[in-house]
Structures are given as C-alpha cells and as structure tokens.
Image (tube, rainbow, N blue to C red):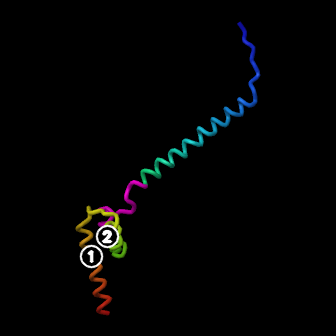
Amino acid sequence: MSRKKTKQDPVNIFLDVIIIILIFAMIPVGFFYYNARSYAEKPSFTRDAQMMGFLLEKRDYAAFIQGRYVNSYNGDTSTDGYNALADYIEAAFNYKIYDA
C-alpha cells in the first residue's frame, strides 16, 4: 500500500503561509488591545497612601501637593489625611511667599 505523493498547488502553499503569518500577527495585536482596554478603564496616575507617605518622607513637597490635586481630579478619596496635610503645606508655602 504505497501512496503517491501529490504535488501541492503553489497557491495553497502561499495561502497557508499567509494564514500562519496572520495568526502570529494577531496574538500581539490582541495582547496590546487587551492591555490598552484594561489601562483605559483604570483611573490614571492616582497616588496611593504609600506613595504619598514616601513623598512626605523624602521631603518632596511639590510632588506631594501635586499628588493631592491628582487624587482629587481622579476622585480618589483613600488618602484624605494626606490631602489635608498637602493643603496645610500649600497654605504654609503661600504664607511664606506672602510674608516675603
């Protein structure tokens, strides 16, 4: 029982190669689309309490105050204590500028 090998049509080979290329091209595109969708649904650039504490510890007051405005813009209320402290620091800066 021997089978003869039949010659494949070059068009079929070409189409098979195109299908394989499209499959491997769709995997990264789908991955990118999934990540872009999940990133777009999250509020961006919110500062959590750990980050706010880190900025306060490093005495980066400008970034600390900026984090307060970023959180209020995104509607994040998990750092209310840090937001109050940022308001106090900003008021102290403004008083120092007024006094000078």
Report the residue at 33% width, 75% height from top: 61
Q: Which residue sits furthest bottom? A: 100
- Which residue corresponds to mark 2? 68
Taking depth in this image into account, of 44 and 60 the one nearest to the observer is 44
The quadrant the C terminus occupies is bottom left
Task: Point out the tag, 2 or 1, that comes first from the N-terminus.
Answer: 2
Could you say where residue 37 lies in the image, as x and y percent from the top left? 45, 51
The residue sitting at 23% across, 68% down in the picture is 81
Counting from the top left corner in percent of width and height, residue 25 is at 59, 43
The x, y position of residue 59, in whole percent, is 33, 74
> Mark 1 Cα within 10 Å, few/some/many (few <14, many 20+)?
some
Q: Secondary structure at mark 1?
A: helix
- Magenta-drawn segment: 40-54
Residue 6 sits above or below residue 10 on the image: above
Whether residue 32 is situated above or below residue 18 in the rendered picture: below
Q: Which mark is residue 87?
A: 1
The amino acid beneath tag 2 is Arg
